[in-house]
């Protein structure tokens, strides 16, 4: 099998292969097989920022879950929770849902 690249493409692949500790041929084979098996999904550079936003939103949702668990623990032990803390958690929930809604629409409209 022969694979051809222009100089810039080859330099890019050589850099990636070197970073992965592989020869160019081994790197190309590894990446091609991973893509073919759908183990990885190559994304254009402009999409990576959007995917990072979704990942950040996911982290926020996890934090919200932790906060809600802490509040539930206090309330279940017949403690009192401050209105400020409840408002802060609900505000974070609203902002995170807005971010996820916007990302979902972008995906549905094919902008991502």
Image: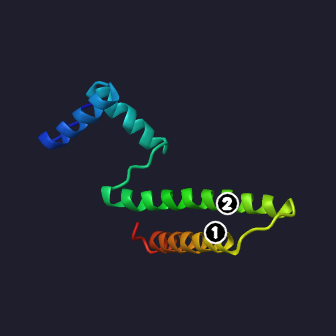
What residue is pinned by disc 1?
89
- Quadrant the N terminus occupies: top left
Residue 83 is situated, as x and y percent measured from the top left of the image, at 70, 75
Answer few, some or many: residues within 10 Å of disc 2's Cα (few below 14, many 20 plus, some between 14 and 19): some
Q: How is the image coloured?
A: rainbow
Q: Which quarter of the picture shows residue 89?
A: bottom right
Tell me the residue at 44%/42% (across/down). Answer: 36
> Relative to 97, does residue 26 appear above or below in the rendering?
above
Answer few, some or many: residues within 10 Å of disc 1's Cα (few below 14, many 20 plus, some between 14 and 19): some
What residue is pinned by disc 2?
67
Residue 8 is situated, as x and y percent measured from the top left of the image, at 15, 43
Is 109 positioned to the left or the right of 83 in the image?
left
The reply to whether dot 1 and dot 2 touch (C-beta < 8 Å) is yes
Tell me the residue at 31%/55% (across/down). Answer: 45
Tell me the residue at 45%/72% (across/down). Answer: 106
Residue nearer the viewer, 57 or 86 = 86
Q: Secondary structure at mark 1?
A: helix
Residue 34 is situated, as x and y percent measured from the top left of the image, at 44, 38
């Amino acid at each position: 099998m022969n694979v051809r690249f222009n100089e810039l493409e080859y330099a890019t692949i050589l850099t990636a292969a070197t970073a992965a500790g592989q020869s160019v041929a081994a790197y190309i084979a590894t990446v091609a097989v991973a893509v073919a098996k759908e183990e990885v999904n190559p994304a254009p550079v402009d999409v990576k920022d959007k995917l990072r936003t979704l990942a950040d939103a996911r982290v926020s949702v996890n934090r919200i879950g932790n906060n809600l668990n802490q509040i539930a623990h206090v309330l279940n032990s017949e403690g009192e929770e401050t209105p400020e803390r409840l408002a802060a958690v609900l505000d974070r929930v609203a902002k995170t849902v807005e971010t996820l809604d916007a990302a979902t629409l972008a995906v549905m409209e094919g902008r991502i």
